[in-house]
Amino acid sequence: MRKKIDDYVSGRIPPPPIVTALGITMIRAADGTAEFGYVADGRHANPMGTLHGGILCDLADAAMGVALASTLDEGESFATLELHINFLRPVWDAKLTAKGRIVSRGRTVAMTACDIVDEDQRHIAAVTGTQMILTGQMAKGR
């Protein structure tokens, strides 16, 4: 998995379809951390006109997942078991950065966290996740 992340970071393989569809971009990933960017401009607004919370969830999930994936060995994969998000500030038009990191990593379970900030470093959302590390047959095809 680590090689796949390295290939993704270097541009040798294309990003996952979901990040392309949403306009999320990877800034960097290595050693249990990752940063992703997103420009909020109204295209994913909710009925109130602010950025839909699901986009913030996707942005954080990408940053936390790639942070974890950057530490996995060949033949390992993972699945997110739980994601918790606190929405701290509404967003209309802004350049956002999601900063994902590993909080704790065991043999089978990891906990990750992500802070989403705007270009003025205002805290937009605080996110935590729990991931199950998959090996052997469970990791096949993932």
Image (cartoon, grey):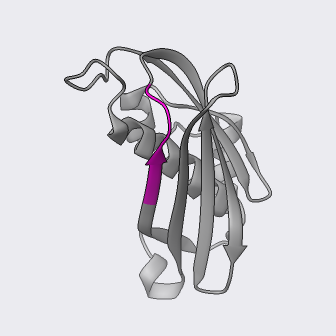
- Measured as percent of width and height from the top left, residue 81 is found at 42, 72
Q: Is residue 53 left or right of residue 91?
A: left
Identify the residue at horizontal 43%, vertical 30% (top origin): 20
Residue 85 on the magenta segment: yes
Which image quadrant: the C terminus? bottom left
Say whether residue 142 is visible: no
- Is residue 24 positioned above or below 64 on the image? above
- 93, 72: nearer the viewer: 93
Residue at 31% x, 23% y: name it: 44
The image quarter in which residue 108 lies: bottom right
The one nearer the camera, 141 or 57, is: 57
Residue 76 in sight in this render: yes
Q: Is residue 31 above or below residue 131?
A: above
Q: Is residue 89 left or right of residue 120?
A: left
Q: How many marks?
A: 0
The furthest residue to the right: 31
Residue at the spot x=25%, y=26% of the render? Answer: 46
Q: Give coordinates of residue 60: x percent, y percent.
A: 52, 46
Q: Horizontal and vertical percent for residue 117? A: 62, 32
- The quarter of the rendered structure image containing the N terminus is bottom right
Residue found at the very far front of the displayed protein: 88
Q: Give coordinates of residue 32: x percent, y percent.
A: 74, 59
In the shown orientation, is residue 83 left or right of residue 126?
left
* Residue 11 found in image quarter: top right
Q: Is residue 56 magenta?
A: no
Vertical order, 20 against 3 (above or below)? above
Residue located 39% across and 29% down the image: 22
In the image, the segment drawn in magenta is 84-90
